[in-house]
Amino acid sequence: MIEVKPKSFESLLSEAITKAKTNNDTQLISMTEEIRKVDPVRFFASARKLSMDRVFWTSTSEQFSIAGVGNAWKVEAEENRTEVIESRWQKLLDEAIVHNPYKVPGTGLVALGGMSFDPSVRKSELWNNFSHGSFQIPILMLTRRASRYYLTTSLEVRGDDDPNELNKWVVQAKEMVMDRTEWLPDSPGINTQQEIAPGQWKDTVKHAADMIKSRDAEKIVLARELRVRLKKDASVASILKNLMAAQPNSYVFAVERDGDCFVGASPERLVKQEDEQLFSVCLAGTAPRGKTDEEDREIARQLLHDEKNRSEHDFVVKMIRKSMETCCDAVYVPDKPVIHPFKNLQHLYTPVTARLQKGYSIFDIIEKLHPTPALGGVPREKSMTYIREHEQLDRGWYGAPVGWMDSNRNGEFAVAIRSGLVQGNIVSLFAGCGVVRDSDPEAEYEETKIKFRPMLSVLED
Ligand SMILES: C=C(O[C@H]1C=CC=C(C(=O)O)[C@@H]1O)C(=O)O
C-alpha cells in the first residue's frame, strides 16, 4: 500500500492516472475524510439513485455501521473462492494508493461481501446474481463509529481517464448519497406467504434423526424456505431501518447484486478480528421468549439444562475450539454456555477468544470455521453430504459468512442467518435448525417458524 498526503482528491486522481499510464495498468486510489453526521440507512437509500451495487453492515450493539455503493474494486470467485479472494485482496493491498489519516477500523480500504453456504453446489436460478464468493470496495463508503462519521472515496483509474471529468462525477455522486431529505417508505405489507414443501421437510427431519440414531452422524442442520409476495416492491433501506430498531445485539446486513439484495439480522458472529486478537461465538440451542418476565426466566432455565439443546450447543463449542487451536494461541472458551436473549427467541451462547498466530489471516479462520455445526453438522463432511442430497433447497448465501475486512487487519463476519433474498416484491426467507437424535419434526418445524419472525415482522404492514 502506498500512503500519500494529497492536496485534494483531484490531485490524487492526476497522480494515479499518470502512474496507470506509465505502468499500462489500472490503479486503485482511496481517500478518507471525516464528515458531519449522515445516517447510514439514509445514505444507503439515497445511493439507490446511482444504480450501482450497494452494501450495508451494522453491529447494533456497537454503534458501528458501514454503508457503501459502487464497485471501485470487485472480486467474484466460483472455484477456490477463498484462495482467489485472498490473493486478489493481497495484491490490491500492495498496490493501492491510499490517504487515510484516521486508521479507524472500517475506514480506508475496506472490502465487504460474503460467500455461499456450499461452493460445491450448482447455483439455482434464485441465486443467479450471487457468486460463490463476492467482495467489493465501494466507490463511496460511509463509516459510522459512535458519534464520528467518515467518508471514503475509492476509484480504479486508467491511463486515459480525465481527472476533471472523474472528479466532477465524484462530487455529484457524493451530493446524491448525502441527501438528508431521502424518504423511507413504510413496510410494504405481505400479500401471500408460501411455505416450500413443509411436509416433505418434516419427513427429512425424521429421516435425519433416524440416521443419527443409527449412529451415521451426530447432528445435521436442516433448513427450509418461506416465499413471501409483498404488496409492492420492497425498499431494502426501510427493511434495514426496521431490523436495526427491532433486533438489538444483531448484525444487520445487506449485499446487493444487480438489483437482487440479500438482507438479514443475524445474532451469530462467526469471527471478529482486531489485529491478532480474535473473537468468535458458539450459538446453538433455541427456545422461545416468555410472555412475562417470570415465564421468560423459566424457559431460559429449562434451556440451560435441556439435554438435547446442550448437546446441539456442545458440538459447536468443541468444533470451534478445535479449529481455533490449529492456528491460534490463548484460545479461551468458558466451561458453560449462558443465555443470550433476542427479540423473538433465546439461544445458548458461549463466547470464544483467541490470538491468531503469525502467518494466518482472517481467510484461514473463515475457511476453518465455516460451516460450524450450528449450520452444517457433525461430522462436517457427512452432514454436508446429507444436506446436499436431502435438503431440496439452494441455500445460496444463507448460513454463510458475510461481513467486511480492512487493510489494517480488522474485520468482522457474521453467519448469515435470519435472512432473506429480496427480488422486487418477492422475498425468499430461510431458517434452519439442528437435528439431533431426539429431534421431533413438529417441534423443529415450529422452531423454524419462530426463526422466520425477525424478517417477516419487518415486511408486514
Ligand atoms: C440455522 C439457524 O440457526 C442456528 C443458529 C442458532 C441456533 C440454532 C438452533 O438452535 O438450531 C441453529 O443452529 C437459523 O436461524 O436458520
Image (cartoon, grey):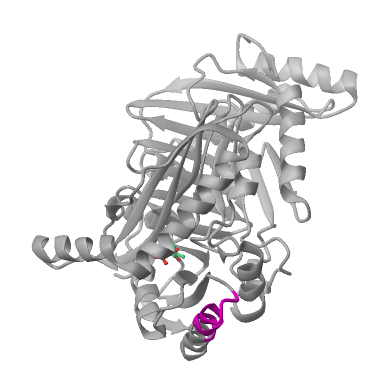
Q: Nearer the viewer, residue 204 or 37?
A: 204
Using the image, determine if residue 240 lies above or below residue 345.
above
The quadrant of the image that shows the N terminus is: top right
Q: Nearer the viewer, residue 190 or 428?
A: 428
Using the image, determine if residue 141 lies above or below residue 455.
above
Residue 183 showing in the rendered view: no
Magenta-drawn stretch, dominant element (helix, strand or loop): helix
What residue sits 36% from the left and 75% below the top? 449
Residue at the front extreme of this rendering: 215
The quadrant of the image that shows the C terminus is: bottom left
Total number of numbered labels?
A: 0
Q: Is residue 422 magenta?
A: no
What residue sits 26% from the left and 59% below the top? 343
78 left or right of 56? Answer: right
What residue sits 79% from the left and 21% below the top? 17
Q: Is residue 211 magenta?
A: yes
The quadrant of the picture showing ligand 1 is: bottom left
375 left or right of 443? Answer: right
Residue 379 coordinates in the image, percent (x, y)? 60, 64
Q: Nearer the viewer, residue 305 or 445?
A: 305
Residue 232 coordinates in the image, percent (x, y)? 43, 71
Q: What segment carries the magenta color?
A: 207-216
139 left or right of 230? Answer: right
